[in-house]
Amino acid sequence: MATLASIEPSASDYAPGEWEQRVDLAAAYRLVAMYGWDDLIFTHLSARVPGPEHHFLINPYDMMFEEITASSLVKIDVNGNPVGKAEHPVNPAGFTIHSALHMAREDAGAVMHLHTPYGQAVSAMEFGLLPHTQTAMIAGHDVAYHDYEGIATDLDERERLVADLGPTKHAMILRNHGTLTVGETVGACFVRLYFLERACEAQVHMLSAGRENLNNPPQGVEEKVAGQSNPKGLGMLAQALAWPALKRKLDRHNPGYDS
């Protein structure tokens, strides 16, 4: 039976703030697995390491999301290459999307990208995310779109990703591909991803009844909800309340991510 190396790290083994970032990102990976959003070992969640070096944390390419720990995350540079000794392989091509957004947006402390069936389904719909549920209205006003260009290995796609997300949006539907969010913190990024994924799931279910049978929200309500769920407020709510609760949930169901 394959086993993972046992490591007993501590915060003192890392640069200031890095261990805390590692713990949060490892928690996010395991929560993605818990919610059934993972795609074997594929897709990525990344987080910026505090400091001026422009280093980032990403998943080891040979581990399932449910088994990732803080110490197993790999530190990489802007090109996706490991910084220092790496005990696990990484997928540099998988960091193409992430590196573009991390480098372009100072507030992109974390970037998360998924290939869920619901997210892919909505990404393939010409009309995108519909404002027919409260969750979709909360998420939708903060969503940008990026056309599919093939598997994201071409570095010149990065400038178009940045341009499509723009300076203020925090979520993106990658056409014919999946979903993506950015956040100042891992917690804020994850909660935005949760709202986007839930909105996509609801849309797939509601469209099974036929689009002609949908109840359109009253005029002006979509704009009202946008004002009630501004990105800054949602990020603060996520970090202060939802993220600690999610980590407690994880402690009950899949502890050990903070090792």
Image (cartoon, rainbow, N blue to C red):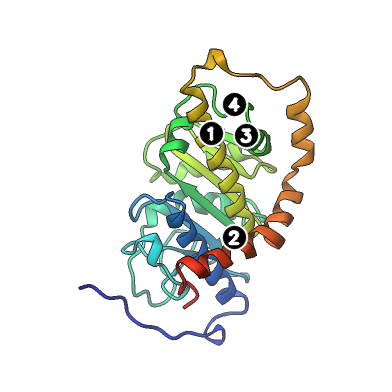
Q: Which residue is mark 1?
A: 202
Q: Look at label 1 and name its amino acid.
A: Ala
Q: Look at label 2 and name its amino acid.
A: Val
- In the image: residue 80, left or right of residue 202: left
Residue 186: image tag: 2
Q: Look at label 3 and name its amino acid.
A: Ala
- In the image: residue 113, left or right of residue 105: left
Gap in angstroms between the C-alphas marked 4 and 1: 10 Å
Q: Look at label 4 and name its amino acid.
A: Leu
Q: Nearer the viewer, residue 16 or 213?
A: 213
The answer to whether mark 4 and mark 3 are in CB contact below 8 A is: yes
Gap in angstroms between the C-alphas marked 4 and 3: 7 Å
Residue 130: image tag: 4
Task: Look at discs 2 and 1 and give the one toward the viewer.
Answer: 1
The quarter of the displayed image where residue 127 is located:
top right
Q: Earlier along the polypeptide chain: callout 3 or callout 1?
A: 3
Q: Which residue is mark 3?
A: 136
Q: Earlier along the polypeptide chain: callout 2 or callout 4?
A: 4
Residue 3: image tag: none
Rendering coords of residue 184 (x, y %): 66, 57
Q: Earlier along the polypeptide chain: callout 4 or callout 1?
A: 4
Dot 2: within a 10 Å radius of its alpha carbon, few (fewer than 14), some, or many (20 or more) residues? Answer: many
Q: Quick check: 83 above or below 37? A: below
Instruction: Report the residue at 47% width, 84% height from top.
Output: 9
Task: Look at discs 3 and 1 and give the one toward the viewer.
Answer: 1
Rendering coords of residue 112 (x, y %): 52, 52
Gap in angstroms between the C-alphas marked 2 and 4: 26 Å
Instruction: Report the residue at 46% width, 23% height from top.
Output: 208
Rendering coords of residue 109 (x, y %): 61, 59
The quarter of the displayed image where residue 71 is located:
bottom left
